[in-house]
Image: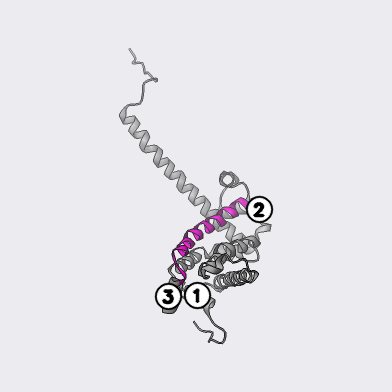
């Protein structure tokens, strides 16, 4: 007589254990695939922005360059703009976390670093991160990239940096000259970052941090030397 199988029975402890170990493994595999797909799309976007410009890129171009099918692309992003904004947001979120270190420094702290000719630690971290993202920043800040991103970087990083080293009595001063002062130096600092990236990031992060502070405090008539 053939034994009948009761499919309504609950899984045994051994079966439950197997199920509990399989699910995380499957999830980890899926997570790795997602990471690989996004890395491939990032590399594809950078290459295509450099070669033909963002406006001329299609989703098919991205999928072909990343060796992915359109279904995989649309599993993660609604269109090429969504992909670009995702990558830009990643950069800005990391920059914001690094820049939060600036709030821990007083003007006296900043001046102490300048007098001792030591680089501000948060600026070193900032240029370290810019180096890591150099390929993306070169593409997105270039002629084939996103013209809005430069302004976003300037407002988030450069403007906050200038405001951070201002004397407290000027930080909320409504005087128009203060606003122009901040705007002038913020735009100049974006130019420094862009020039460094465009010229191949030859200077190390410590040197760039020193350059950034030297440019801010150099006086008329002083030698143009670090």
User: Disc number at residue 58?
Assistant: 2
Q: Earlier in the sequence, mark 2 or mark 1?
A: 2
Q: Is residue 86 above or below residue 20?
A: below
Name the side, left or right, on which 8 lies relative to 79: left
Q: Is residue 116 visible?
A: yes
* Of labels 1 and 3, the one closer to you: 3
Looking at the picture, how far across and down is residue 89, in whole percent?
55, 55
Q: Is residue 22 above or below residue 43?
A: above
Q: Nearer the viewer, residue 73 or 173?
A: 173
In the structure shown, which secondary structural element does the residue marked by tag 3 occupy? helix
Q: Nearer the viewer, residue 169 or 14?
A: 169
In the structure shown, which secondary structural element does the residue marked by tag 1 occupy? helix
Q: Earlier in the sequence, mark 2 or mark 3?
A: 2
Q: Is residue 99 above or below residue 219?
A: above
Farthest residue, direction top: 1
Label 1–label 3 contact, CB within 8 A? no
Residue indicated by mark 3: 112
Looking at the picture, how far across and down is residue 66, in whole percent?
56, 54
Q: Is residue 168 above or below residue 19?
A: below
Q: Is residue 162 visible?
A: no
Question: How many numbered discs sit on the rendered protein?
Answer: 3
Q: Is residue 88 magenta?
A: yes
Residue indicated by mark 1: 213
Q: Is residue 132 magenta?
A: no
């Amino acid at each position: 007589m053939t034994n009948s199988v009761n499919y309504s029975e609950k899984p045994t402890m051994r079966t439950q254990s197997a199920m509990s170990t399989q699910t995380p493994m499957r999830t980890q595999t899926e997570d790795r695939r997602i990471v690989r797909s996004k890395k491939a799309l990032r590399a594809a976007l950078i290459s295509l922005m450099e070669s033909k410009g963002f406006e001329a890129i299609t989703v098919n171009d991205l999928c072909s360059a990343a060796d992915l099918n359109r279904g995989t692309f649309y599993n993660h992003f609604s269109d090429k703009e969504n992909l670009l904004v995702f990558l830009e947001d990643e950069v800005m979120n990391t920059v914001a976390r690094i820049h939060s270190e600036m709030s821990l420094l007083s003007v006296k702290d900043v001046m102490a670093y300048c007098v001792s000719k030591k680089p501000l630690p948060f600026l070193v971290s900032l240029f370290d991160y810019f180096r890591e993202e150099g390929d993306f920043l070169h593409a997105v800040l270039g002629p084939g990239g996103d013209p809005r991103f430069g302004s976003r970087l300037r407002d988030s990083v450069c403007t906050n940096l200038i405001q951070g080293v201002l004397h407290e009595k000027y930080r909320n001063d409504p005087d128009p000259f203060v606003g122009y002062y901040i705007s002038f130096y913020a735009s100049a600092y974006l130019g420094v970052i862009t020039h460094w990236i465009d010229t191949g990031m030859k200077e190390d992060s410590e040197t760039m941090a020193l350059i950034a502070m030297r440019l801010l405090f150099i006086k008329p008539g002083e030698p143009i030397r670090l």
